[in-house]
Amino acid sequence: MRRDYTLRILGVVLVALLAAGPLLPRWAMFLITVSLCYGTVVLGMMLLMRTGVVSFGHGLYYCLGAYAAGTLDVLFGVSDIAVMLLAAILVTAVVSALLGLLLRKYRDIFFAMLSLAFSMILYGLLVKTSALGSSDGFNVAAKTLFGIRIAGTEFERYLIFAITVLTAFLAAVCIHKYLASHMGRLAGAIRDNELRVEYMGASVRNTIHVNYIMSAVLAGLGGALAAVSVGHIDPEMSYWTTSGEFVFVAILAGTGNVLAPFLGSFIFETIRSFAYEYSPNTWQMALGTTMLLVIMFLPGGLWSLFTRMRKAA
Amino acid sequence: MNQLVAVLIDGLIYSSWLFIIAVGLTLIYGVMKILNIAHGSLYALGAYSAAALAGYWINQGHPPIGSYAAMLVAAILVGLIAGPVIERGLLRFMYGKDEIVLVLVTYAVFLILEDFIKLAWGVDPYFLYQPYSLLGSFDVGDLTYPVYNLVLFGVAVLIGVSLAWVLTKTRRGKMLVAVIHDREMAAAMGINVSLVYFMTFTVGAMLGAVGGALTAPMISVQPGIGAETIVLAFAVVVIGGLGSLPGAALAAVLVGLVRSAAVHYRPELDLFAIYFVMAVVLIMRPKGLFSVQEARKI
Amino acid sequence: MTVVLEAKGLNKSFGAVTAAADINVAVERDSVVGLIGSNGAGKTTFINMVTGYLKPSSGSIVFGERDITPLAPRQITRLGICRSFQIPQLFNTLSVYENLLVGVGIVASGGKKWADASRLAGTPVEAVGSILERFNLTAYRDKPAGVLPEGVRKLLDIAMAMAVKPKILLLDEPTSGVSADEKFGLMDMVMQAVRAQQVTVLFVEHDMDIVNRYTHRVLAFYEGRIIADGEPGVVLDDPEVRKFVTGDARAGGGGKHAAH
């Protein structure tokens, strides 16, 4: 059995990022922060895809997490990061537990379309809510962490960066352990043959529901962290094309390892920032073409390149 | 009373529009089992081409009445070119893959075409108002409606009836239905499934483009209309039952009326309406209003 | 002998088609029962009803003391009835080892889903090891189930059904698709495993040699009814059975030819 270095690599990356943080130029720190937020969402997508389910509506939870964090600030004057993250977790957990009751009965296209529909419902609601800025959204600023003031301090950016790194690390470790456990194997079994799983005594729907909630919470965390680091949120986060991007990155990255979503997100965000600057009207074309190439020639995503190289070695 | 009539008429007009944009999508799904996200781009391409061609026609000083023909020609050309290019050039290499993979392929095509449109026509909006205002308006009681909306209704009925006739009365149509029900069996009986796929996709593409062309005079044609419309088309198709034409018609009517009611009585819910209907219908009938019976595989 | 499974007055119709008519069976513990009959005679319908996949139009099924008729397949499996499939139902992208580990894990974790099965007091990993040995699958341990030869797939399918430690095992045509010279080997292996775990077995078979050799009792189905019920020698000689099931019109034959 091949040794599993994932946890070791995660640890090394954690330490490296935290140590190198203060030395990074502003744009690099921002890029990494945003990639990690995105990667956390895609981690959730990966979990669902490993269970055989593709959601075309995870923007819903990304947006809910962001708005949960944001409304605490704007409507209640609470701008503590820890509280914001907690709110994001609670809101997304509750909503996904409820919606999951309906969604768990569906698969394939119906699941994708229903999840898309729910995200568009939130979009429609937010666009019509003037208290939350309608389609313009609003700005979010985190001012304290566990009560300690951070806004305006020179540590502000680094602290937000560090919290994001830490959250992403913890998420990756948890999901890695989860996937290596019985539940992780069960997810793969469900993807392969639901009938057999039921006939061996496990509930397919319960497992899908649980994994759906977990993926939603991850998306919410990503959204809340994105809100705090980018500083602005808008209903576009819940538009179906945002969800489509998550699906795209998940496919690009591959579902072989928890490191893949973060790697894929980093590549995606890097290309995106350059594309926006130099050629904003061919960005989607590039995405689409890449997706086709990946589907045709690298169905396991970029991560499968790693596993192939390992096998060859 | 007046309000009720207004709700009804507005509802039916919106239903017509919904049916026109959704019918191509459900046809393609029914025959090929592909949920074609690129349908949104074909709609957009139809709108842009129609705006361009009809706009050119009018600007050249030709009689404005000809602009309708220009719109139609533009849409048909879009379908005839884009349809085969996508189907023969890409999709046919993907048949046999998972349904969800095919959806992702069409999503990739959608992304590519969205930028293609931006490159071809720029990002500024186009306006093509003449075909819309040319026909004038008519009165129902003390409500005034543009005649163009009536045209929409007429086209929807025309498309629905023609498709129904073709599918049930002509040989080609019946072959299509055979493929819808059981592709393998149809192939075993000598039906050229490959040709059926090609024709279906092209017709579906044309219908999508026609939807866009018809809508162009009513909106500002700009990037993003494809993305907006495809979600509505999805909803109609899912509500009606994937692959069912009568389902799409009924779904369009249902959604149209509900949305119209929302617009008149609770405007903040109008974006809601279509998804609300979807959720309710799926809870009661998990496969949509009319689901196409598929042969059981063991 | 104790009765472990009882079907009382089972009926099932699909519109005008009668798939099961007044089925009454009492299965004794640790027995090996063969279900024979031509295609469409009602054998698979019977299995589907016992495993909860189909609900009978009327009648009941009692397992131990409990009426299991209204239960879902998942619940029935948890109570101790497991089945294998005519076309092997495996987890194709998982290795043979992982396939079995899933089954063992489901049993080991019981209601406690969050427990990491491979840390539970050695049971699951050891259990998989012994299953692999018992079914001669050790050589295929790390291969994905999707690439296995057909006979091995069948074995794995049955091994998985055994992995959940059932009290009653239902095998749907265990030797179909298996070459003639492998059939007995497969059945020997299965029966050995079965005897070691004290499992009651019912299996559907078309090969009368297999039926003759391994069963204590045979139920012959025809048009949804059980037309004969008894020891293999007796049932296979029954003129009705010879007429409607084995198609063997010779007197005194126990059906040396495989029936269709």
Image: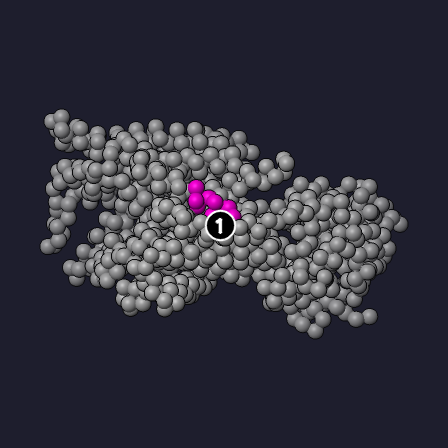
Local packing at callout 1 (Cα closer than 10 Å; few below 14, some 14-19, many 20+) is few
> Mark 1 falls on what kind of element?
helix
Q: Which quarter of the figure has residue B120?
A: top left
Res A77 quadrant in image: bottom left
Percent of width and height locating residue A75: 27, 66
Q: Residue at x 44, y 46 (%)?
A: A265
- Residue C53 inside the magenta-drawn segment: no
| In this view, A272 is above or below B1 | above
**Which stretch appears magenta?**
A258-267
Under mark 1, the amino acid is: Ala
Q: Main secondary structure of the magenta part?
A: helix
| Residue drawn at x 46%, y 44% as measured from the top left | A264
Note whether A162 is above or below B173 in the view shown. below
Q: Which residue shows up at 62% across the image and 58% down it?
A: A182
Q: What residue sits right under mark 1 in the picture? A: A16
Q: Chain of mark 1?
A: A
Q: Is residue B100 left or right of residue C223?
A: left
Membership of A264 in magenta stretch: yes
